[in-house]
Amino acid sequence: MKKLVIAGLALAGAGIWVGDLSAHGGTYRGPGDTVPPGAGGGGGNGPPTGAPTGPAGGTTGGGTPGPVVPGGTTGGTRGAGTTGLTGASEESLDLSAWTFWWEFNKDPFLNLKAAIANGSGTTGGIDFFLGTGEADQGDVTLLPTQRQIRDEIVPALLGALRTESNPDIVTGCLIALAKIGEATDENGDNAFEQVITGFLDSGSQEISETAALALGILASNRSVDLLEALVRDNSLGQKAVGSTEVDPNSRAFAAYGLGLLGNRTGDPAVRARIVSILTDVLPRAELLARQDLAVACVISIGLTPLDPGGLPAEGEGIDPAASRQQQIDFLLEFMVDQRRNFMSRAHVPAAVARLLDGLDDEACRKRVVDQLLVPVDPRKGSKFAAELRQSCTQALGLIGDADDDPLDREIRKALIAQVPELQGQSRKFGLISMARVAANPGQGAANLAANRAELTNALVAGLRRTSGEDQWAALALGLYGYLLNHRDEAPAAALAQALRERLGASRSGDDIGSTAVAVGLFGDLGARDGLVALLEEVNDPQTQGYVALGLGLLGDKRAIEPIQKVLDDAEYKPQLLQQAATALGLLGSKRTVETLVEMLDSAGSLSSQAAAASALGFIGDRSSVSPLIAMLQDDSLTETARGFAAVALGIVADKEELPWNSKIASDLNYRASTPTLNSMSGRGVLNIL
């Protein structure tokens, strides 16, 4: 596969590292100071070492967060920048760094699309794009209008697909069209679906597999037949790709496509069919040497919740397509079967936790928790792989709450007493789970305050731990404050004070970065002055980017001016550029898009050009559309730069509020990754913007 090396491009605002950029996707989801193998020097003034911030690039480089192998740490100390790593292998990455969890999970906390649509973002306006003919509301909201999407963006993307063959440009356009979406006509036909399907038999594997995934992102019910054929590698699938077999990557991408389609469809029968397909394929896929397809099946089953129903009659086996309860029980049986590969089993806990959401069935909930608690037990769980134990620890945080139900007391006891005895990553995930459980009041309880305090006291004590656990404890406290604030509850002032004191005492880049994000999440406006001082004092671009992001999360518009100064000087620091732009987007700055457009026009390197284009995608409005279209159509630019423009156009006009792959990335155990899920080569679904 042709590799396009973008020297030292770290896109932090999107949380992605783009070093050795592949034609297919190219952005590595992980801290920015960790450069994929072979990625070397920098464009402009050289690459900042930085932690990742977001989505990875989709075909060309654009996208959403791109998890694969989490790794680097934020570099530097106060007043001193660092250069970080100039090359790394998956084995050398510190997968336990706090930055990995943040980059995989940040999308719901940032939610720039909502900020822009509500008029608090940086510019322009959009109706509810992809609606059913709503009138223009350009003066009310800040996204592109429906007319602009249909009359300018879509024709530009279709035009590029007709004339271009470069994988960077083609894949960028395919994903962009899928994100924009097209209504199905009265005959069930979908124009975009027909266009995308035509690229399945491309001579480029990158283009072919991206087309399979794009069908799932588009989410037309008519695509189920074709996606099933690709997953099963049957004659229909082979005919579609023009080969005697469907490539294993394409099969995995098609399985993810089924999950994405199942997550969006409103037709219960379509969901049931998708679950039937995936649960039929999974047992055979798990027997393959590569676990890509099996992992994709497990994750996608969890993305496709069926309607609630009953259990099978006595003497009958489980029918996972019959009800959500049987869907969950099927996955639990798969998880506890020690004969199965640990890699695919490690994704079951998150899948069943997602399926429990909104399901009013305490007996089913108990069956799930009983199974998840076994691997977490230091003694009973020793027979389970570390990755599965990590996943169970995370899932308990999604299921438990702070009320007095016996099951929830058992979950809290495990998190406080048992998880700390496990290996490092489980302990770190356990801190996040404590925060989630503490913030969830459940059915309420007379002892709610005491139950919460037991967990938050453990988090405060965690601030004194070593080996990076203190950074996770800070992040967990920030998460707790965020969740309570969004329930219109006020977190204890003592917790805000603990974070503020830690911020003032922090010296290393990781301590500063994690605490800056934590106080931003917590919403402690009293920390604003300390963050502004750090923004001016810290020289390391990655750390500075996280400080800017913390200020953006705080929502105090007085921070716009100091962050704007950072952005103005960040043209040759791509990672910092995107983090600062994201922060300004959260704060509603009116200058940001203008600044980025100017940078796009004057950029002297591909890395700066790509960073500006990607940032425009994440925070852009109608005024960013024309320069991005011009960039896509400019033959004098490199194909990679033009591909970034296509990706950015897709982000600007996305039909969904959150990046499409945030459904997969959130609460994922990225320690159990496969090449088609998240990869340093940039070819995983989480590397695609």
Image (cartoon, grey):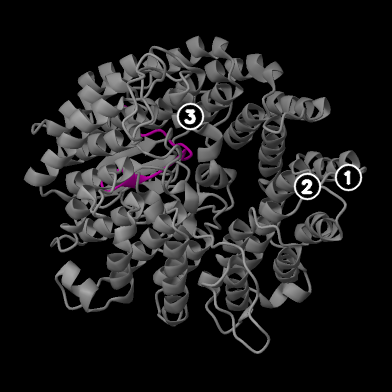
Mark 3 Cα shell of 10 Å, populated few (<14), some (14-19), many (≥20): some
What is the residue that sits farthest to the bottom in this orientation?
315
* Label number found at residue 442: 2
Q: At label 2, which amino acid type do we have?
A: Gly
Q: Secondary structure at mark 3?
A: helix
Residue 169 on image: x %, y %: 18, 44
Does the magenta segment cover residue 57? yes
Q: Report if residue 613 is visible in the image.
A: yes
CA–CA distance between discs 3 and 1?
Answer: 33 Å
Residue 660 on image: x %, y %: 41, 46
Mark 2 Cα shell of 10 Å, populated few (<14), some (14-19), many (≥20): some
CA–CA distance between discs 2 and 3?
Answer: 27 Å
The residue at which mark 3 appears reads as 114
Mark 1 Cα shell of 10 Å, populated few (<14), some (14-19), many (≥20): some
Labels 1 and 2 touching (C-beta < 8 A): yes
Side of 53 where 335 appears, left or right: right
What is the residue that sits farthest to the right in this orientation?
446
* Label number found at residue 445: 1
- Quadrant containing the C terminus is top left
* Label number found at residue 631: none
In the displayed structure, 180 sits above or below 143; it is below
Dividing the picture into quadrants, the one containing residue 482 is top right
Label whose residue precedes the other's in the sequence (2 or 3): 3
Q: Secondary structure at mark 1?
A: loop
Residue 677 on image: x %, y %: 41, 59
CA–CA distance between discs 1 and 2?
Answer: 8 Å
Determine the main secondary structure of the stretch shown in magenta.
Answer: loop
User: Bounds of the magenta span?
Assistant: 45-61
